[in-house]
Structures are given as C-alpha cells and as structure tokens.
Amino acid sequence: MKPKNALNTQSNISKYDDVYEALISAHTGLSIEDSMKLNAKLILFLINHIGDAEVVFEALEKATKTDANVKLE
C-alpha cells in the first residue's frame, strides 16, 4: 500500500480521450509563447490542487527521468 502522499501513477481518469482532446484544443491557434503560458498556468493550477509538495517533487523527478513516452503503471 502506498503512503497517502505518494505519487499515483495508476491510470486514474475517466474520459481520458476527452481530456486529451480538450487539452489539445485549448492550444489551437495559440502562438508558441501563448501555448507555453497556457501550459505554465495549467501546471500551477494542478500543483495547487495537489497541495502536497512532496508529491509534486516526486512527479518532477519522474518526469525528468522518464522517456518522452510516459506510461502510467
């Protein structure tokens, strides 16, 4: 059993195709700069929602040490 503040790498979202489509659509027509700003704002909202620095640090570590083809466990 994982500790409460462990990063969840199990598939944990319903309608993931719809979420992915919404993410891609949000970037449609944006310049690279505006797209990067959108990503930064989204990341900050989600970090705030997570609310646990240790989980964010674990996610950052995994993201920087993982191939581009991230797979959830």
Image: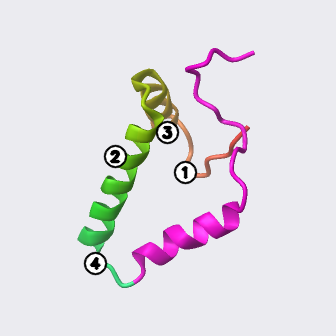
Image marks 3 and 1: residues in contact by CB distance under 8 Å: no
Cα distance, mark 1 to mark 2? 21 Å
Please determine whether, in this image, residue 22 is positioned above or below residue 48.
below
Give the magenta-colored segment's residue range: 1-28
Identity of the amino acid at label 1?
Ala
Q: Quadrant of residue 39?
A: bottom left
The percent coordinates of residue 20 (x first, y second) are 59, 66
Q: Is residue 49 left or right of residue 20?
A: left
Does the magenta run of residues contain 9? yes
**Who's the residue at 34% across and 46% down the image?**
44
Quadrant of the rendering where the N terminus is positioned: top right
User: Does label 3 or label 1 sit earlier along the sequence?
Assistant: 3
Mark 4, residue position: 31
Position in image of residue 23 (x %, y %)? 50, 67
Picture residue at 45% right of the left edge, 37% below the top:
64
For marks 1 and 2, the one nearer the N-term is: 2
* Of labels 1 and 2, the one closer to you: 2
- Label 3, label 1: how far apart the Cα atoms are: 9 Å
Disc 3 designates what residue?
Answer: 63
Q: Secondary structure at mark 1?
A: loop
Amino acid type shown at disc 2: Leu
* Mark 3 vs 4: CB contact within 8 A: no
Residue beneath label 2, please? 44
| Outermost residue, bottom side | 29
Q: CA distance from mark 4 to mark 1?
A: 22 Å
